[in-house]
Image (cartoon, grey):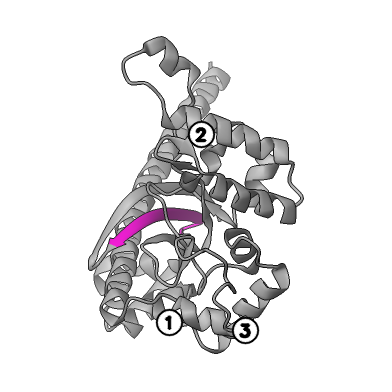
Amino acid sequence: MAMLTVALVAVFASSALWQQWRALEVERAERVRVQAGWILAGAFDWARLVLREDARAGSVDHLAEPWAVGLQESRLSEFLAAQGGTVSDAGADMLEAFLSGQITDLQSRLNITNLIADGRISQADVRSFERLFESLSLPPSELQTIVDNLLLAASRPTGDAAAQGKAPLMPTRIEQLAWLGATQQTITALRPYVTVLPVRTSVNINTASAEVIHAAVDGLGMSDARRLVEARARAPFRTLAEAKKVLGGAEGALGDSDAAIGVASRFFEILARLRLDGVVVEERCAVERDLLNVQPLWVEKVLAPA
């Protein structure tokens, strides 16, 4: 009886201990979720303010502007102190929160949406993607599959349920190109050079890579694209005419591409990364800037162990 009593007490004690541990873990996770949500919301508001102030400064966007300077991982208390704030009300555990972030110009990439114009395939934009696929050594047949399925998605009927079932959904993010038949390897290779935006856009030659500029401008070699990238590092282009001067000043230096390239941007991606209490929370938000109005398009959150 004594041994049985000891065994029962041990079982009850271990069960009570496990319940207590589980309750503490749930409370800890909820506390981290709420704190991370407030901090990231503040980070996004701050990033949107930076983009609004940039719009006040001028209509040209380039990599020497404040929005393009990334925030390296910093202790939250130091970041707030630099901004004239305080963390005294947040609790001592907030001192161990680390924040980092980056704003990226989405118009520094080719836009998948450009492949369809007025319900038809845009051959000029298809050629741009063909040049990009060639420079990345990707299979051309996969591009044709993406274009065909994108046309089906763009012309997806609204009343016919059977036809809707056959047509893929229109993607809104690069990861969703799998809906159009792209393999994971292709999506990974395209990620730094391609985006999906709700409307047709031009490529900003002040922020785009040499690969994207080469693909966007018909007849422009990779060496000339690299010359543009080197020239803008010394002085950002204020007009396309300045870019043409770098290539010799001829009228045809950039081809018939005034609609394909530009020096201003409307769409940006905000990345915020928070490390708090052994957990890393990453949140990405695509925004559209219309004058001083900065509106989110989509938000994606990733939670992972630190």
Number of other residues with Cα within 10 Å of mark 3, as a class: few under 14, some 14 to 19, many 20 or more? few
- Is residue 136 shown to the viewer in this render? no
Q: Amino acid at mark 1?
A: Arg
Tell me the magenta residue range.
275-289
For badge 3, the amino acid type reads Gly
Element marked by disc 3: loop
Residue 75, by quadrant, is bottom left
- According to the picture, the residue beneath numbered tag 3 turns out to be 248
Label 1 crowd bin: few (<14), some (14–19), many (20+), radius 10 Å: some
Outermost bottom residue: 234
Residue displayed at 61% across by 31% down:
181
Q: At x 70% / y 68%, what residue is drawn?
A: 221
Q: Along the horizontal axis of the image, is 70 left or right of 229?
A: left
Magenta: main secondary structure equals: strand
- Magenta stretch: residue 278 in it? yes
10 with respect to 225 (left or right): left
